[in-house]
Amino acid sequence: MSNKQMKLGAFFHLPGHHVASWRYPTSGANRVLDLDFLTELAQTAELAKFDMVFFADVFGQQLSEGGHSAMLKLDPIVIISALAAVTKKIGLTATLTTTYNEPFHVARKFAAIDHLSKGRTAWNVVTSANDGESLLFGKEKHLHHASRYERAEEFVDVVKKLLFSIEEEAIVIDREKGKLLDLKKVHSVDHEGKWFKVKGTLDAPSTPQGHPVIVQAGSSEAGKELAAKTAEVIFTAWQTLEEAQAFYRDVKGRLSKYGRKPEDLKIMPGVFITVAKTEEEARDKQRLLNSYISPEVGLAYLSNYTNIDLTGYDVDGPLPEFSGIEDKTNPLIRSNIIRDIAKRENLQTLREVYERIAGARGHREIVGTPMQIVDQLEEWFLNEGADGFNIMPPTFPDGFNDIVELVIPELQRRGLFRTEYESDTLRGNLGLSKPANPSIHSSHPVRL
């Protein structure tokens, strides 16, 4: 039995991570906008003792009749606000882009939800990889990859300054003396950088966690450096233990130059799990879901992740060579992972490739019995491949319930996962320390 315990996120990509999950007979495709459904899923995750539920976000994607992008979705910051009221212990992670928001907006939203949830929020910092997002904001052209990450670094810095601008103890409420605030504990932000000029304070004190847990999902050179400087959880995609170990050691090795320790960052790769009591049954589930993928949807799906327009291609033909993209600063990590999968597994046709990534999207995929699943998770966890995992069910609710009922008990039996929460806050359950307020220790704080 292990003394180490892994951290687990429940990645809520509804109605399932598989591209054809909406066609699965018992999927919740008709309930993705239903708060009762979201509540049921979140409470199930909490009963299973997941560290957090995780909502990704991207907009500006082209809608289609039969693809996963046809599923409409709600703003995740609004969703976690609602779920804060119907859960008690589980963390709530929402994605907000640094490219098409302003720091004050993001700081204010997360401050509110972190207070209302008593310290259970996390912000997944992204830089908007989808070119189509720019058009929604009146921008003719998307920022290049390098510029997006440069902006993101300054953005996170400003958000933290705002979240710490009013100390937790600033509200004194001394009715006899007529004193509501201790202004010595209020620190006006005076920031002027390349991307932002911000002066003033937030209108709420710093939160129960100091600030929400910072999650980041980039695996490029710029992404790894941003994670080493700012992130407390990193969500990444790798196929082999050797790749995962190289990434783990690389990112952890960068922390010291920012005055951070290895335990200050939890690395949680995505893993797409199809589980059943027998391997044959699990494989049958996998084949059934893949049978629901139409060729048009499969090609569109593959086009999105390889940056090649495959419309009209023969699905029984080979994956074409890649000619590159205009943004030379974009390392195309996911596209390269998918190409490596095709080469390593000798996938001969476009159909084979899109069926192979239909749920995992380049993340690790495990199909089998609970013991087979946990054997592989345990190998990565105990050998510096991961501090935990962001679990990607094929369908909701069935595929998720299978993981809760079959995989979680096996993890607990081996002592690899908790049976009770250790803390009331997400930061506490992840084993992360509460950050100190830098304004308190500043030699020249700017006072209101």
Image (cartoon, rainbow, N blue to C red):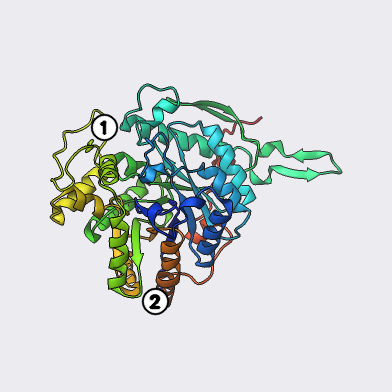
Relative to residue 30, is residue 297 drawn left or right? left
| Relative image position of residue 61 (x, y in whole percent) | 38, 36
174 or 395, nearer to the observer: 395
Sequence-wise, which precedes: disc 2 or disc 1? Answer: 1
Q: Are marks 2 and 1 in contact (CB under 8 Å)?
A: no
**Residue 90 seen by the camera:** no
Residue lying furthest right in this view?
176
Circle 2: element type: loop
Relative to residue 275, is residue 344 drawn left or right? left
In the image, what residue type sits under mark 1? Answer: Thr
| Relative image position of residue 331 (x, y in whole percent) | 25, 38
Residue 329, numbered label: 1
* Badge count: 2
| Relative image position of residue 237 (x, y in whole percent) | 30, 52
407 or 119, nearer to the observer: 407
Circle 1: element type: loop
Instruction: State how far apart marks 2 and 1 are (Cα).
Output: 44 Å
Q: Residue at x 27, y 35 (%)?
A: 330
| Quarter of the rendering containing residue 301 | top left
In the picture shown, does residue 399 fall above or below 146? below
In the image, what residue type sits under mark 2? Answer: Arg
Q: Which residue is mark 2?
A: 414
Neighbour class for label 1 at 10 Å: few (<14), some, many (≥20)? few
Q: Quadrant of the N terminus?
A: bottom left
Q: Residue at x 48, y 70 (%)?
A: 418
**Residue 304 seen by the camera:** yes
Q: Residue at x 37, y 58 (%)?
A: 394
Q: Quadrant of the C terminus?
A: top right
